[in-house]
Image (cartoon, rainbow, N blue to C red):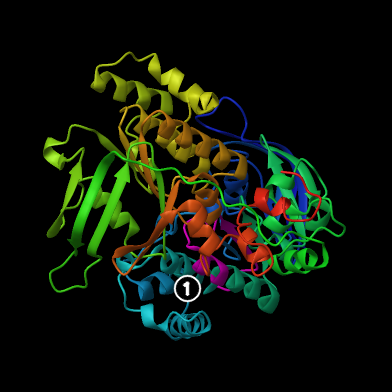
């Protein structure tokens, strides 16, 4: 049986001049696990939402869509959708209410609602969270609740939009295992829109690739790994050993292959840069949302220097965003000091600007270009700079789009431009690579490193260890309300254990300092830098 059938589907958003999807024809069979991949703005989220009629975007749609053997209608209770931002789907204020909402809304008897809720909560290990307010949950916990709120109705088709983008590496691996069990144990058809193939691609039956709204590839993952046009979305093992046969797709397969190959035992560690001019200093920061609750910041210390790109990682809910907001002056610590340019925040001679995790919060106008011009007018600068900034970020085609119609990755890039319009000396970035495809993330890294070379300072919190390893000068872990293991990036990743990159895990115990794909490529004897 076909779970999804699309024939010549074309869709254009109401606010767009060009279609988001063009002539899409594909079939997904019942029980398949499919990865839907492609650059930011290629149409992945639009396609997923069209498969869930209740949340389908407004616009012009042509072609045929069939779901679970029936033509697409007004509602699809057998189709579950987990958004990239779980908060978008929440309708209750507590976990129990959120999970009970769907069966109650479907008019099921109270005893059936309680049974389904109990089964789902027990199966997915949510018992300890059941009475918690949704607002108090970490990003990983919200993602789990969002999944369970969908699974309580036992859908036949599960759609997930960037399910790992907001999760720390350990939580992301656990969530990937959970999705795999849903597919294997319940027979649920699963379609995952994702930018990175690291976690799930090896387990998928197919890779469907979109580019500029068109379907350009529909292949088994191992066959796709041989395609030079698709190698950038492959897992680290495949990118490092693309010329090998068969191409490894997992860390385990990469380790097995590296062990068989003659290889170097150590690579030279990159030189580290010294800094002398501090621009942002935090000393003994303590913060709590309530007097009777545990401190989120528990004596946090930090020094950020001119020209430095510092990346902090850590578990969901550890307080990384709270730290950024405190440094930006949005939250006030009850103890400790923050100094910018050697002076208190209110008297700071330098400017700091923050890119929030919810990037849409920055936009006030109906299009990106109008919002840029609005900001420039308020800053007393020429409105023509709006076009220059969009060009600088490669986002010219998004100028006339409504911010809420952008993909997650497009929104991140446009929001960064919105922040850069303020010409800050210090950038505080909350998950800047979230929602970006690998090529866009690489471009973002290049932009940030260029800003640092110009004398700016960048502090980012990120769950992408690969982004940090490839771009940051300094890295640390935020844990227990404090910054730990703050080291130059090469030393941080050469020593990393659980917070190692996929490349580092492949090379562990065999090749020292091979913590990026580029370095791992140099490991086999005879390879060239």
Q: Nearer the viewer, residue 320 or 21?
A: 320
* Crowding at mark 1 (Cα within 10 Å: few <14, some 14-19, many 20+): many
Q: x, y percentage for residue 501?
A: 58, 59
Describe residue 78's horizontal placement relative to residue 210 as left or right.
left
Q: Dividing the image into 4 quarters, which one contains the C terminus?
A: top right
Residue 38 in view, yes or no? yes
Residue at label 1?
103
Q: Is residue 64 above or below residue 477?
A: above
Q: Nearer the viewer, residue 144 or 277?
A: 277
Residue 406 in view, yes or no? no
155 in magenta? yes
Q: Magenta segment, which residues?
A: 153-174
Q: x, y percentage for residue 519?
A: 66, 51
Q: Nearer the viewer, residue 199 or 206?
A: 199
Q: Secondary structure at mark 1?
A: helix
Q: Residue furthest right?
A: 245
Describe residue 451's horizontal placement relative to residue 518 as left or right.
left
Q: Dividing the image into 4 quarters, which one contains the N terminus?
A: bottom right
Q: Is residue 460 above or below residue 251?
A: above
């Amino acid at each position: 049986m076909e779970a999804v059938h699309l024939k010549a589907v074309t869709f254009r958003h109401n606010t767009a001049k060009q279609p988001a999807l063009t002539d899409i024809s594909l079939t997904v069979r019942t029980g398949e696990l499919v990865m839907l991949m492609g650059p930011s703005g290629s149409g992945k989220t639009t396609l997923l939402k069209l498969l869930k009629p209740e949340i389908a975007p407004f616009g012009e749609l042509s072609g045929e869509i069939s779901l679970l053997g029936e033509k697409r209608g007004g509602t699809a209770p057998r189709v579950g959708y987990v958004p990239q931002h779980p908060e978008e789907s929440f309708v209750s204020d507590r976990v129990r209410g959120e999970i009970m909402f769907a069966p109650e809304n479907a008019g099921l008897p109270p005893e059936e609602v309680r049974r389904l809720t109990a089964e789902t909560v027990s199966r997915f290990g949510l018992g300890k969270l059941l009475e918690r307010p949704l607002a108090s949950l970490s990003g990983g916990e919200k993602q789990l609740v969002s999944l369970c709120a969908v699974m309580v109705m036992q859908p036949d088709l599960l759609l997930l939009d960037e399910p790992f983008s907001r999760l720390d590496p350990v939580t992301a691996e656990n969530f990937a295992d959970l999705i795999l069990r849903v597919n294997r144990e319940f027979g649920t058809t699963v379609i995952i829109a994702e930018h990175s193939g690291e976690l799930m691609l090896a387990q998928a039956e197919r890779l469907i690739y979109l580019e500029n709204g068109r379907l350009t590839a529909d292949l088994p993952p191992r066959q796709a790994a041989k395609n030079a046009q698709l190698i950038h979305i492959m897992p680290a093992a495949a990118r490092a050993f693309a010329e090998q046969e068969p191409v490894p797709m997992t860390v385990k397969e990469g380790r097995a292959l590296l062990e068989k190959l003659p290889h170097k035992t150590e690579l030279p560690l990159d030189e580290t840069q010294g800094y002398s001019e501090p621009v942002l200093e935090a000393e003994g920061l303590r913060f709590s949302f309530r007097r009777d609750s545990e401190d989120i910041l528990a004596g946090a210390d930090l020094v950020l220097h001119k020209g430095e790109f510092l990346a902090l990682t850590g578990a969901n809910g550890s307080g990384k965003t709270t730290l950024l907001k405190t440094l930006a002056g949005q939250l006030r610590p009850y103890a400790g000091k923050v100094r910018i340019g050697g002076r208190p925040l209110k008297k700071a001679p330098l400017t700091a600007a923050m890119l929030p995790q919810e990037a849409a919060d920055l936009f006030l106008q109906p299009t990106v270009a109008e919002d840029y011009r609005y900001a420039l007018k308020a800053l007393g600068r020429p409105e023509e700079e709006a076009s220059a900034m969009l060009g600088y970020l490669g986002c010219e085609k998004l100028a006339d789009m409504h911010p809420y119609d952008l993909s997650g990755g497009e929104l991140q890039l446009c929001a960064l431009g919105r922040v850069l319009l303020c010409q800050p000396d210090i950038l505080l970035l909350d998950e800047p690579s979230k929602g970006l495809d690998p090529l866009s993330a690489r471009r973002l890294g290049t932009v940030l490193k260029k800003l640092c070379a110009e004398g700016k300072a960048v502090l980012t919190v990120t769950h992408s260890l690969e982004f940090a390893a490839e771009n940051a000068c300094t890295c640390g872990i935020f844990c227990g309300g404090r910054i730990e293991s703050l080291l130059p990036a090469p030393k941080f990743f050469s020593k990393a254990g659980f917070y190692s990159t996929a490349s580092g895990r492949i090379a562990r115990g065999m090749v020292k300092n091979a913590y990026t794909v580029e370095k791992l490529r140099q490991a086999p004897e005879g390879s060239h830098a």
